Amino acid sequence: MSDTKKKTVAVGPLAQVKKQHGSRADLIEKILPLLDDPDAAAAKRALTRTPNAKLITLLAAGTAVQKQFGSRQALVAAVVKATYPKGNVPEGYEDKLAAYNLKRLYDLYQKRA
């Protein structure tokens, strides 16, 4: 009886990007509409300097937010409702949340809900 074990090779972020999205530029183009950033050029410049692993995480969070809430504003409202179910929201809290990046905001919702 021969016991053949298959080794599992960990796939790095660059290999994931190439396999799932074709190229890094294609992945960035998929992420940009999910961010709802008014300054798309600045967002694109920032994303080009972002590591591949973080880009993959941003895409996953962005698509989850899009499917579950439809927009960033709806996610902010859901976080506020989960944090303050009785409605006693401190002044400026929504503005503070609106300044958070999408991934941080989604993580906050997951912790509160």
Image (cartoon, grey):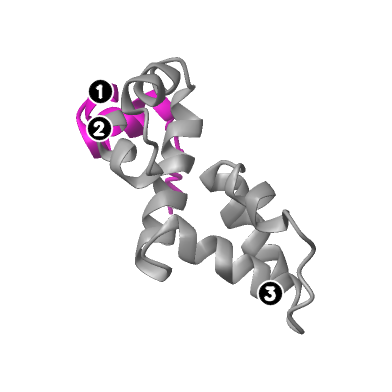
Extent of the magenta region? 1-27
Q: Is residue 10 visible?
A: no
Q: Is residue 48 left or right of residue 94?
A: left
Q: Is residue 67 visible?
A: yes
> How far, Cα to Cα, is label 2 from label 1?
6 Å
> How far, Cα to Cα, is label 2 from label 3?
32 Å
Question: x, y (%) of residue 12?
Answer: 45, 28
Q: Which mark is residue 82?
A: 3
Q: Along the polypeptide, which appears first: circle 3 or circle 1? A: 1
Amino acid found under the numbered disc labelled 1: Ala
Question: x, y (%) of residue 24?
Answer: 29, 23
Say if mark 2 contacts mark 1, CB within 8 Å: yes
Residue neighbourhood size for the residue with mark 3, other residues' Cα within 10 Å, grouped as few (<14), some (14–19), many (≥20): some
Q: Which mark is residue 25?
A: 1
Amino acid found under the numbered disc labelled 3: Ala
At mark 2, the secondary structure is helix
Residue located at (48% from left, 42% from top): 57
Q: Which mark is residue 14?
A: none
Question: x, y (%) of residue 92?
Answer: 72, 54
At mark 1, the secondary structure is helix
> How far, Cα to Cα, is label 3 from label 1?
36 Å
Task: Name the quarter where the N terminus is drawn.
Answer: bottom left
**Corner quadrant of residue 21:** top left
At mark 3, the secondary structure is helix
| Residue with the mark numbered 2 | 29
